[in-house]
Image (cartoon, coloured by chain):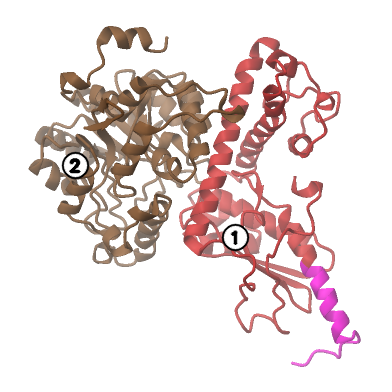
Chain colours: A brown, B red
Amino acid sequence: MYEHDGERYYIVDGHVHYWNAAPDNWVEGQEEYAKGWIECFYAYHGLGPEETHWPLEQYQRYDEDLMMRHLFDEGHVDVAIFQPTYLKQWYTEGFNTTERNAILADKYPDKFVLNTAWDPRDGDAGLEDLEAKVERWGMKGAKLYTAEWKGDSRGWSLKSDEAARYLEACQRLGVVNLHVHKGPTIWPLDKDAFDVSDVDFAATNFPGLNFIVEHVGLPRIEDFCFMATQEPNVYAGLAVVVGGLMHARPRMFAKVMGELMFWLGEDRIIFGSDYAIWEPRWQVEGFAAWQMPTGEDFSDYAPLTTQAKRKILGLNAARLYDLEVPGEFRIPEDESAVLAPS
Amino acid sequence: MTAAPDPVAPSTQVAASAALDEAVLAALDTVRDPELDTSIVELGFVTAHAVDADGRATVRLRLPTFFCAANFAFLMVADAHAAIAGVAGIAGVEVVLEDHFASAEINGGVASGAGFVASFDGLAENELEGLRRDFLRKAELAAQDRVARPLLAAGVPPDQVGSMTLGDAPVSADRERLRHRRRELGIPSGDDDPLLLRPDGTSVTPSEVPLHLHRARTVRVSIDTNGDYCRRLLAGRYGPADRSLPAPRLAAGRFVTGPLTIALGGRSPHSGADRL
């Protein structure tokens, strides 16, 4: 819960990790990639406020106490959603697996939502694993990283027949929230790896599933926006937008927020800190206090209302995940209906 | 092995090498990052460039992250190679991309002229011209916004902007940039051609103008945001660009004569239409 200017916000952090990227978890012969990955993350970390920067060693592997403090004691977060990424080709026990996330999610069931992850290249065995995990933990969401390396493969597409089998399984199992994260590789490598047309394809074919595109499709915000405006079951995950821009590039952040509000509207944008890339505290506080700047460059963009902030900071994600939001934080149905974009 | 005595006086030779190196830098400045639509020199991707006494050019490139997309990286290395090879007096070219997950495939592939598909055996289906064209279209649309946005801000109604020609727009670097991108795409770029064009080069109908302008704005915001992100990641990875520092030097022993490496100090002397 966060209170600012007399307004109280219910906070759902839609994108957190509990990773282990320490050198003793690097696969022999793959050290270059394991190191490259976490150092890439660390570079993003450096774009946040200086006083929140961590030493690299802590960044490679942090513990439960630190994460609980950053999220719930200091970060105003009510519920955080784990988004696992396996990367077992580079990290022996995986980078940020469901199993590792479950260490905390099992211990603090009221604080965390545990998601799974799947990869259509795992075939029947992967489908069985998905079913077993859902049976054990009852997930409602999954993280999909299309750029993951597996053997000689450099990624996969949501357009494939194999992916369709997994999407059908998700529908059947109630894993309705699919968080799609695009990375720099895919097959074939000559295509734009960040292209979101496969999300468009899957969202059309599976209207009962929600597709949350993480980083709002960055670096393809435009493709993402033009696609999302056509697909009512597509959402924008704000991770990286708030973390990378709000503090360091406020004018750029304003333009990106303006674009997202123009193309998607306040009901389809979901806050995520991307912890431990960035800590949630400064992001939540900054976003609640944020206003669209005035001036010529921003005259096209609508102001961000308190209601929109309440939805983005928590209520939209709570709706997707059926989280019980205390009455004081809710927006009355009628008011919401009147103010929602047509 | 001893080279034949050089008839040119040493100071003249150094001056000639320096001039050739300036020409190499100017050639590099015409190479753009296709995603960011910005010169690789301006972005700080060129860390060193040198020409030895035999006219062999060596260039080092770096990118903002270890995992920057291999296809765009390949295009930049290949374009840099081609641009330098086109400089009169250059007898050989070596372009080395450093600190990248696919450095070996890209450097080897470009040096041997193998193309993208052969360089990434089994991982690619096609060469990269389709990808290049897709991003040139985005750049062209963003360039329309650069010209249209000040007009809209000055109070020109959208429908009037929609009926303007390129020649109607005020003379500006942004207008010439738009014209340049259109020439590269092979779509109408004359003064009598429309200011606003669809990606395929056909006219925007009056009813489409408002949405077209929104789309152009969004593409520009996206490219600008990515460009800023990349610059900051590059600075985070290698330290902020300090133009007062001496040039990073190429490895000793690479040259028959001593390395003549010129720092990327200040603006390129070549800042005409080629770098628009």
Quarter of the image that includes the N terminus of chain A: top left
Q: Residue at x 13, y 45 (%)?
A: A104
Q: Is residue B121 left or right of residue A312?
A: right
Q: Is residue B170 magenta?
A: no
| On-image quarter of the C terminus of chain A | top left
Give residue B74's quadrant in the image.
Answer: bottom right
The boundaries of the magenta stretch are: B1-21
Whether B49 is drawn above or below A260: the answer is below
Numbered-mark total: 2
Q: Residue A158 appears in which quarter of the rendering?
A: top left
Residue type for callout 1 = Gly
Of A268 and A340, nearer the camera is A340
The picture places residue B181, in percent across and down from the top left corner, at 74, 37
Please give the label number shown on residue A72.
2
Secondary element under disc 2, as helix, strand or loop, is helix
Residue B109: which numbered mark, if any? Answer: 1
